[in-house]
Image (tube, helix red, strand yellow):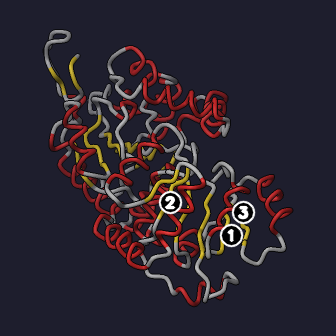
Amino acid sequence: MNPNPVVLIVTSAFGDGHVKVAEAMEQSFKSRGIHRVHTVDLFAEVHPRLNELSRRFYLNRAALAQALYGLMYTKTSGIKPGRGLGRLLHSLGKRKVRKILDAMRPDVIIHTFPYLAAAEIGGEAVSGVPVFTVMTDYVLHGRWLHPNTMKYFVATESMKQSLLAEGVAEEAAVVSGIPIRPAFETWQDRERLMHKHGLNGSRRYVLLAAGAYGVLADISKLIKSIITESEFDLIVLCGNNHKLRSDMEGLYRENKRVHLLGYTEEMQELMSVSTCLLTKAGGITLTEAIAQSLPVIVYRPLPGQEAGNAEWLSRHSIIDTARDEEQLIACLRQLEKPSYRWERIRRMKSFSRKSSAGFIVSEILDALEKKQPAAGQQKFNIAEGKVKTVHGYL
């Protein structure tokens, strides 16, 4: 194996989670002396206008846009990489992607976002570039699947079983947990952090995270309900939505129970001082909270993967989900009870997987050492619709 391989990590700015996973992976590689790591928003590079249009649609808070996204997500969940829509999606921008790969000459490609044109090309070369996929949610979608993938790294055993049901080989599906940055797995001095952020150590705080782009719905009403109907104070993160922050400051600047912030790189510190996280159901934010043993309430999960994340984790009693303000207040009152709160914390500690990024990097480096051909490079002499490959029937 090349002792300093060129690593390409494919990510996306759809939300903030994919970027954070890529960052965790990059840090883990560099901690081992592997510095030629390139993290690229490949879809944005290849199709900037389509990427921006898609991103705005994904972040649109309008009910119709959310419902349409959820319908599209559901209808495409079973797509096959070698057929129709799957082949089209994985082939978008192949010519430009090929130029990028030819210039970079990666020794390994890692996807943290399901734009898989690089996988499509990686498997075409004679020598082949090993391709790996790190899934960033708690539910499986067909967009992530590609026959040139050597290994999938997934959050749970149930996701592994879903992959196996799709025909993925046992050795290609690895339960790793979702990678998060090391700061979320380290102990924080709560008293020091309370003082640093100007918070009252005798109060308990709900950390209300609207997402990187401030898209959690009904924030003003949520703030009013929480300070009226519960004993919790609030730390409100408005993300990069400057208008939202300005509006909230106009309403709550003088209220000492409400602390308003924009986007922050100190999320792990704010989680450490909070009693509960109220958020949307992004896979990375949920994983970070679980690593911090911070009880979570997901409010009105968006259709698509976020609804899937919330449903799976709620069903396993790891988080709570509220679909309206009445359910939200009921959840908060439950969390005011020490016995209920500690049971949630116990379940989180039992579920959390530490050092996922390091584990995945070790698996990838071991695979490079062995230099086995990627799954997509195995040659099959098959008749259409008759033989089951690693990704279902052709």
Image quarter in which the C terminus is found: top left
Q: Measure how far apart labels 2 and 1 are at the Cα level.
A: 16 Å
Which of the 4 image quarters holds residue 230?
A: bottom right
Comparing 331 with 301, the one in front is 331
Q: What residue is rendered at 70% in x and 58% in y?
A: 238
Name which residue type carries label 1: Ile
Whole-percent x, y for residue 344 in the image: 38, 69
Q: Measure how far apart labels 3 and 1 are at the Cα level.
A: 6 Å
SS at circle 1:
helix
Whole-percent x, y for residue 195 in the image: 65, 88
Left or right of 269, for residue 114: left
- Give the number of the disc on residue 227: 1
Q: Earlier in the sequence, mark 2 or mark 1?
A: 1
Compared to residue 86, the image places residue 203 above or below, namely below
Which of the 4 image quarters holds residue 83?
A: top left
Residue for badge 3: 224
Mark 3 and mark 1 in contact? Answer it, CB < 8 Å: yes
